[in-house]
């Protein structure tokens, strides 16, 4: 189990499940007890998504108790979890992406935003990038780790699923070797020394503002120059996904 997931489960048990259901002996816990618990949490103002998460943690714990023969059945299987409305995903259009890149131009993390937008990286994936994950000669970027904050400290953790471990192709002109980008690691040693993350090879931490360069064509295919940091967004009729930031 990932450290952040474990911490989340522990908080739900400590703050919600134990205070309300902890007094009931395990063998006497009934579906009615669990349904009442869910109803009270919904009435208290917790979102359906949070209450469903509570139910999932409780269901999993009771399922383990059933496997260990501590209870004759899992009472949570007889309880209806709350419905969670599906939020509409509204990804960036190419025009949105161009406006976003224009808004962050000159920002310290402009390169990070540009890479994430062009390749479709989650926040933790983008922050977890290190220089050995980027191959400018081959024009590829490999997602190997995510960066997560836990108990006030930063940790590199494996991606959540096997599909999250992937190699993506950088769109042109970013995949072309660039002296400022390639030498960013050596040029920002002082910035890395002042950083809080233990791994000094972090791309997000070490990339200086000078990594911006000018591409020969604009996003619309015109000959006007476009300043960007590493990749520019894929400009096509398809909408650009920003994932969960």
Image: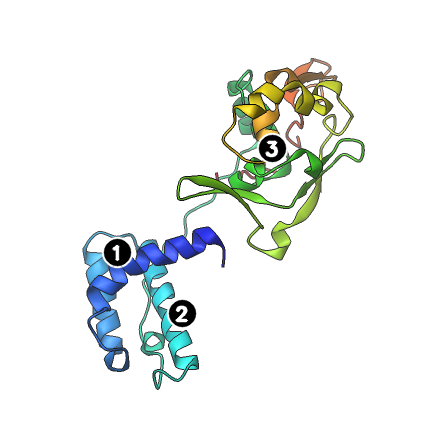
- Rate crowding at label 2 as few (under 14), some (14 to 19) or many (20 or more) other CA atoms within 10 Å: few
In this rendering, which labeled residue sits more in front, label 1 or label 2?
A: 1
In the image, residue 81 sits, relative to residue 133, either above or below, namely: below
In the image, residue 135 sits, relative to residue 165, either above or below, namely: above
Residue at position x 38%, y 70% from top? Answer: 61
Q: Which residue is mark 2?
A: 60
Q: CA distance from mark 1 to mark 2?
A: 17 Å
Chain-order first, disc 3 or disc 2? 2
Between residues 161 and 196, which one lies in front from this camera angle? Answer: 196
Q: Which residue is mark 1?
A: 15
Residue 169 percent location from the top left of the image: 73, 38
Q: Residue furthest right?
A: 137
Residue 202's disc is 3
For residue 105, say whether it is visible: yes
- Rate crowding at label 1 as few (under 14), some (14 to 19) or many (20 or more) other CA atoms within 10 Å: few
Element class at badge 1: helix
For residue 109, say whether it is visible: no
């Amino acid at each position: 189990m990932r450290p952040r997931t474990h911490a989340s489960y522990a908080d739900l048990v400590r703050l919600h499940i134990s205070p309300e259901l902890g007094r009931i002996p395990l063998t006497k816990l009934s579906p009615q007890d669990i349904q009442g618990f869910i109803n009270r949490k919904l009435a208290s103002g917790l979102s359906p998504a949070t209450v469903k998460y509570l139910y999932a943690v409780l269901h999993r714990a009771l399922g383990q108790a059933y496997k260990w023969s501590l209870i004759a059945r899992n009472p949570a299987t007889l309880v209806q979890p709350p419905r969670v409305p599906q939020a509409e995903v509204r990804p960036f259009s190419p025009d949105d992406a161009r406006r976003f890149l224009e808004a962050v131009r000159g920002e310290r993390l402009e390169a990070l935003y540009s890479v994430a937008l062009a390749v479709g990286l989650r926040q933790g994936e983008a922050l977890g990038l290190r220089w050995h994950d980027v191959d400018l000669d081959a024009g590829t970027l490999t997602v190997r780790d995510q960066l997560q904050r836990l108990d006030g400290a930063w940790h590199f953790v494996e991606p959540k699923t096997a599909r999250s471990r992937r190699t993506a192709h950088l769109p042109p002109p970013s995949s072309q070797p660039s002296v400022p980008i390639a030498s960013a690691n050596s040029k920002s040693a002082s910035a890395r020394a002042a950083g809080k993350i233990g791994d000094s090879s972090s791309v997000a931490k070490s990339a200086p503002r000078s990594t911006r360069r000018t591409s020969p064509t604009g996003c619309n295919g015109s000959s006007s120059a476009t300043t960007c940091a590493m990749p520019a967004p894929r400009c096509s009729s398809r909408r650009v996904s920003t994932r969960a930031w």
